[in-house]
Image: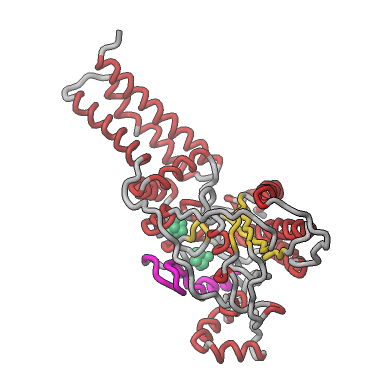
Amino acid sequence: MLSQTDMMNSLLFLFGVLFALAFVYAAFISLREKETRAARKFLLSAVLLPLPFVLTAVFSFPFKGVVLAILMLAVILTLCIYFLPFGKNKSYRQVIPVQRIDERDTMFSRNELVPGSARFRDYYRRNPEKKPLDDAFRKNPGLLQEGTTQYNPFYFASADASFETIAALRDVVDGTVSNKQIPVDAGKISRYIKNWSKKLGAVDCGMTTLKDYHLYSVGGRAARYDKPIEKQHEFAIAFTVEMDHEMVKSAPAGTMVMESGQQYLESGRIALQVARFIRNLGYEARAHIDGNYQVVCPLVARDAGLGEIGRMGLLMTPKLGPRVRISVVTTNLPLVVDEPLHDYSFIDFCVQCKKCADVCPSRAISFEDREVIGGALRWQINQESCFTYWTKAGTDCGRCISVCPYSHPDNAMHNLVRTGIRNSSAFRTLALKMDDLFYGRKPVPAKPPEYLQQ
Ligand code: SF4
Ligand code: SF4
């Protein structure tokens, strides 16, 4: 029969072997993700971390009992930090914005103002403080243009191909509703749409009642410019699609804007199909796709339970972080709505992290805590600085998305970390330190995927 000392030694040895295996697995996953720095560090950890456990288990030395107790305590403490809700885990109530966003103030709308035109004069007469800011980006070559720092004719032409395809679809966001209305059960049709949209390529789908603050107050692009936007539907359905990890890691290279265009197109296609499907059933539905939104997609998606809004002002989803694109369908089809996540762990992690702010080439992301803006407690990026950088780089940059610790791939290794992050504030601090250690505080942009290198 094993003595108590033998049992402790065996347990320590087992921990040592388990740690070694876990870190070798992490190194293998990192190699597959082409994270060579992380793979090297995980391999080194696979050798160094189990050593105290294995050596203590195998050899006898003075004060072995004390060392053994310290090691066991370290294991118990780590498990407690992972599982127990230490620190700030309060559930919180989202503050509802009291002001709607005017689409004419968005950078894409301002970028379309033609100098000398009536719209141009009118906009800067009403917003003289924005003129010098916008003059700065107008001096740059512009998005997807030759002469930008990230110019690559193949990547830019590919991105343009996706954006032009979306543009060709912008006029079919709405259409004729079948005059034969099929009676539906709200629960069944909601489930059907969620499942079918995933079959179409969405990673997630959520539903919410359409609120006034989801809608732009006034249209800012194409034919809807200057036109007030009225609420016409009762519900909104939000879809997220994944942006490829390898493409995003190369941000701010041209491959990033290629991926943005591709996923705007994918998410838009799903919204168009679902909207058409709903109209076929005899209910009104409008798709909101790139270049033809009446809604602010991240707000709709957040209220539909798909994530929280983080420091960079984007939707942070539980499995892919900000590495998603969103589309929306608004409709009068009766639906069962989802609850928002009300998950404070995202906010608390962003409060501690600030990695996106650290790498942002235009210093557009705040290092401060959230502020009340438009009636809601949130972070707001400096959209002029961000967009000015885009017009210099020629791409939509995306460095913030690429370095965000939530953007790691959706697999067992990263999901294990995500569970700890959700559970405990203390683990969030630890996870952030580990992310900096293994992936770097300011990771160097990766090369574009090999199959796209010329
Ligand atoms: S990089 Fe960090 S601070 Fe920025 S959004 Fe991601 S988690 Fe939040
Ligand atoms: S896209 Fe680039 S410039 Fe804009 S906020 Fe993110 S990191 Fe900064």
Toward the viewer: 176 or 426? 176
Residue 279, percent from left and from top: 77, 61
The range drawn in magenta is: 369-394
Give the vertical position of 375 relative to 191 (above or below): below
Image quadrant for the N terminus? Answer: top left
Image quadrant for the C terminus? Answer: bottom right
Ligand 1 location (quadrant): bottom left
Residue 34, percent from left and from top: 54, 44
Please give left or right for residue 452 compared with residue 49 in the image.
right
Give the vertical position of 114 relative to 273 (above or below): below
Outermost residue to the left? 62
Residue located 66% across and 67% down the image: 233
Q: How many marks?
A: 0
Q: Is residue 445 visible?
A: no
Residue 429, percent from left and from top: 35, 50
Outermost residue to the top? 1
Residue located 79% across and 64% down the image: 177
Residue located 33% across and 47% down the image: 426
Outermost residue to the right? 179
Toward the viewer: 124 or 20? 124
Please give left or right for residue 131 compared with residue 203 in the image.
left
Q: Is residue 253 magenta?
A: no
